[in-house]
Amino acid sequence: MYILNPTKITSRFPFLNPTRGVPKLQFSKILQQNKGFREGPTTKMAWSLERCDEGSIESRSGNIRPATEAYADEAIQALKAGKVIAVPTDTLYGFACDACSVEAVNRIYEIKGRKHTSPLAICVGDINDIGRFAVTNHLPLGLLDNLLPGPVTVVLSRGESSILEKSLNPGLDTIGVRIPDFEFMRVIARGCGSALALTSANLSGQPSSLDIKEFKNLWEHCSFVYDGGVLPAGRAGSTVVDLSMIGKYKILRPGSAKEETVSILEKYSLLEEGAAG
């Protein structure tokens, strides 16, 4: 999908301070599959579209764009205007919108044909942003830095200080949070200044999408479809882990990085909920 500069690998999964005594565990399988995104300072966010025939696709649909820096501002403006866009992540293609726009969130449910009782996750650009939307002060220092960005959704309590609209996932006091290891997604999340509601780009109950052609029937319902080529991580999606409990974790969906995720959690002495200890 994209070319990885080997010198940037450690920036995607930064090591902990050695004085803490907890080595950083890398998502090795995912890294081997991913081809990378950043090329270096002079070609930041450079994109290889060798797997997608950009010209022929764009000739058939006027809302298809490559997922590159040149189109990031366009995506940000669409999101701020309450539009729904389709985006690549480090796992699957997804539908994204402003999580604080009731109309946009409802539109995602309509596009997918999804029941409103099924919750949506949110996406933010950086770990420091998570505290605006969910409670993190009970987590061991450095844990989130080791899990994110990456193919992991962390489920946290929303708390009274969350700025999320109450209409997002009504009745739930937790929220799933993602920071995909995909620079285009992080740039537009930062640019919006808000959380993005994020869910897989497919009709409810249908297979998830690794290529924009797989949800071609839904293109017309999106303001823009950002093409990142064929995604290599498989259809398992992100690993979903509940971290809302002090000192405990619960895997809600194995996803594509369960083994690596559990290894990190156990390094921080978190116990699996229900496990004998």
Image (spheres, helix red, strand yellow):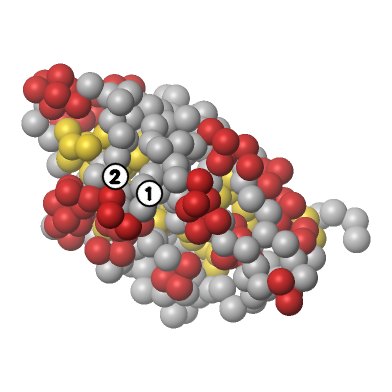
Q: Residue at x 25, y 64 (%)?
A: 191
Query: Which residue position is annotated with label 2?
Result: 46
Whether residue 44 is situated above or below residue 95 in the rendered picture: below
- Residue at x-position 62% and y-position 46%: 27
CA gap between label 1 and label 2 equals: 6 Å
Report the residue at 41% width, 74% height from top: 132
Left or right side of 169 for 165: left
Discs 1, 2 touching: Cβ within 8 Å: yes
Q: Which mark is residue 217?
A: none
Between disc 1 and disc 2, whose residue precedes? 1
Res. 52 in view = yes
The residue indicated by pointer 1 is 38
Q: Horizontal placement of 46 versus 143: left or right?
A: left
| Disc 1 secondary structure class | loop
At horizontal 45% and vertical 56% (from top left) the residue drawn is 179
Q: Quadrant of the N terminus?
A: top left
Residue 112: quadrant of the picture? top left
Q: Can you give x and y, in whole percent of width and height, for residue 77 in the image?
A: 14, 57
Q: Position of residue 28 (x, y in %)?
A: 63, 42
Q: Is residue 252 visible?
A: no
Residue 117 in the image, given as x and y percentages of width and height? 44, 47
Seen in the picture, residue 260 relative to 122 is either above or below; the reply is above
Amino acid of disc 2 = Ala
Depth check: 136 or 19 in front?
19
